[in-house]
Image (spheres, rainbow, N blue to C red):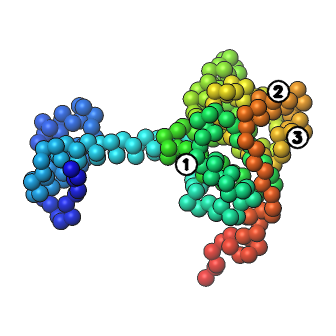
């Protein structure tokens, strides 16, 4: 049995107030929104009662899924909104089979980590954001941070000794992304925040980072003891993808593709 919407215009009188109130009390906003149209269509096309119920609940399920996706996307805090729709696999130095394997998100389900390192402008952040957006679309939770964000988080919660609880809240996400490590000197709070995050997530959640440096060089950014402990936990169950080549942004800018022509 299949149910389709009428393609012709159908008069859709409002629902009776008592039914409207029941749907509101039952918290079925999407059924309440679409019920007048569905009921009118059902009368015009002489649907069976089961078809009406199916259409109503299908709208509620679809509406809730849209709302949940919007909530997960907003909670993630993605920087730009880039997705795989704009991604060009051939422009990346990461082998296509590796790109496809990452898109399956099996590494997330296995609670493994991902490190994407290489020169600036080679698509590290783009790839991580596209993977994060894809994860959100698959029903997973993502949290996006920079090292500076981790430093702010640590300072905010150190005063009342709630750092551990704050990190635990961050790790409600299935994937935590830390972007652009190595661009700027790492403050002490940020270095400690990264260690605490990686340590707490170890074998429990997936961490994905982008960095201009290979993690073996993190002792150039933070105290050696802290760097060693962080990298040891980060890389134990990690996939390392190294990018190479010229900056895509610079190449596009030199080719005049970075802006629309002036008229």
What residue is at 77 percent from the left and 35 percent from the top?
235
Residue at mark 2: 229
Could you say whether the residue bearing mark 3 is in a helix, strand or loop?
Answer: helix
Front in this rendered view, residue 50 or 254: 50
The first of marks 1 and 2 along the sequence is: 1
The first of marks 1 and 3 along the sequence is: 1
Decide if residue 154 is on the left or right side of residue 69: right
Could you say whether the residue bearing mark 1 is in a helix, strand or loop?
Answer: helix
Could you say whether the residue bearing mark 2 is in a helix, strand or loop?
Answer: helix
Image quadrant in which the C terminus is located: bottom right
Q: Is residue 60 visible?
A: yes
**Mark 1 and mark 2: Cα distance apart in space:** 31 Å
What residue is at 65 percent from the left and 61 percent from the top?
89
Report which quarter residue 215 is drawn in: top right
**Mark 2 and mark 3: Cα distance apart in space:** 13 Å
Report which quarter residue 181 is drawn in: top right
Extreme-top residue of the structure: 161
Residue at mark 1: 134
| Residue 3 at x, y percent in the picture | 22, 53
**How many other residues sit within 10 Å of disc 3, few (<14), some (14-19) or many (≥20)?**
some
* Residue 217: mark: 3
Question: Is residue 262 positioned above or below 20 on the image?
Answer: below
| Residue 71 at x, y percent in the picture | 47, 41
**How many other residues sit within 10 Å of disc 2, few (<14), some (14-19) or many (≥20)?**
few
| Residue 208 at x, y percent in the picture | 68, 40
Decide if residue 198 is on the left or right side of residue 67: right
**Mark 1 and mark 3: Cα distance apart in space:** 30 Å
Question: Is residue 142 positioned above or below 10 on the image?
Answer: above
């Amino acid at each position: 049995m299949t149910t389709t919407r009428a393609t012709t215009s159908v008069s859709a009188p409002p629902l009776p107030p008592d039914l409207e109130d029941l749907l509101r009390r039952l918290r079925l906003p999407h059924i309440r929104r679409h019920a007048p149209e569905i009921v009118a269509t059902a009368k015009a096309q002489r649907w069976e009662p089961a078809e009406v119920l199916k259409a109503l609940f299908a709208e509620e399920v679809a509406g809730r899924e849209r709302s949940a996706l919007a909530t997960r996307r907003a909670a993630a805090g993605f920087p730009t909104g880039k997705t795989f729709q704009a991604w060009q696999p051939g422009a990346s130095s990461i082998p296509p089979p590796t790109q496809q394997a990452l898109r399956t998100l099996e590494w997330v389900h296995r609670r493994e980590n991902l490190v994407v390192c290489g020169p600036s402008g080679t698509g590290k952040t783009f790839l991580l954001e596209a993977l994060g957006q894809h994860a959100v679309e698959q029903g997973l939770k993502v949290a996006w941070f920079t090292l500076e964000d981790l430093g702010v988080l640590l300072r905010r919660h150190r005063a009342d000794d709630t750092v551990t609880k704050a990190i635990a809240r961050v790790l409600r996400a299935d994937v935590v992304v830390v972007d652009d490590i190595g661009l700027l000197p790492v403050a002490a709070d940020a270095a400690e925040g990264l260690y605490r995050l990686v340590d707490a997530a170890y074998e429990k959640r997936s961490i994905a980072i982008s960095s201009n440096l290979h993690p073996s060089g993190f002792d150039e950014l933070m105290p050696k003891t802290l760097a060693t402990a962080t990298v040891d936990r980060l890389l134990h169950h990690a996939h390392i993808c190294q990018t190479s080549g010229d900056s895509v942004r610079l190449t596009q800018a030199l080719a005049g593709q970075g802006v629309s022509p002036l008229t």
